Amino acid sequence: MTMLLNSAMNVTPALPSFEAITEGARRATGVMASGAPRPDPEVVVIARRRQFSAAEKRRLVNEAERCKARGELGAFLRRERIYSSMLASWRKQIGAADRAVLAPKRRGPKPDLVARQNAALSRDIVRLQKKLERAELIIDAQKKTDCCSSTIRSIGRFTSINLYDGCAVRVFRWLLQPANTRAWF
């Protein structure tokens, strides 16, 4: 039908111009019409988390405090690309730092870390030596009762001893020692 109309009007069909053809070719090759290369659409693989210094945190918190009008704080957060939770945690950090600075300083000589560790280690040595002595006494008593084929039963304060060998006297003497010279186990 278009041919019929074109022949009736004696109009020759318009051929696409050379510029239109080359424009399509430029788009396919990645060169824009302005001659500048297209930006690389590839996404950066490694994203880095932003780290704010203490000065930046203070500046952002102070600037957020100045936002009084409705919607101004939200615009500020979007502009700086931060969250309200970040502001809340930074306020806590700043408050804790201010309290630490204003806290009274301890007077006198500073505690010696090495001396404190040595004291703790010596206390541990004494505690472990007492524990070892108790364990050795228990083992000695078990050896004595085993060698005598005896049974020792403690009921309250009374101790009944059934011994069959000659070592009954030694075990009985050990049991009769004062409480401060033998270990309870």
Image (cartoon, grey):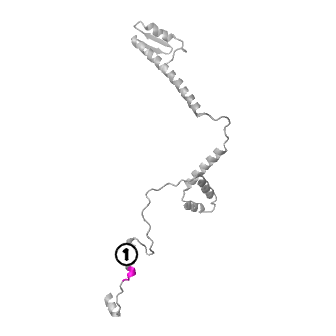
Residue 146: say if magenta: no
Residue numbers of the magenta segment? 16-20
Q: Amino acid at mark 1?
A: Ala
- Seen in the picture, residue 136 relative to 98 is either above or below; the reply is above
Residue corresponding to mark 1: 25
Residue at image point 38% right, 78% down = 22
Front position in the image: 181 or 38: 38
Across and down, in percent, residue 141 comes to 45, 15
Magenta stretch, overall SS: helix
Across and down, in percent, residue 130 comes to 51, 21
Q: Secondary structure at mark 1?
A: helix
Across and down, in percent, residue 170 comes to 46, 8
* Label 1, residues with CA under 10 Å away: few <14, some 14-19, many ≥20: few
- Seen in the picture, residue 103 relative to 113 is either above or below; the reply is below
Q: Where, by quadrant of the figure, is residue 14 drawn?
A: bottom left
Residue at image point 58% right, 54% down = 87
Left or right: 105, with 82 as reference point: right
Total numbered badges shown on the rendered structure:
1
- Seen in the picture, residue 113 relative to 21 is either above or below; the reply is above
Across and down, in percent, residue 164 comes to 40, 7
Residue at image point 62% right, 58% down = 63
Left or right: 62, with 146 as reference point: right
Position of the N terminus by quadrant: bottom left
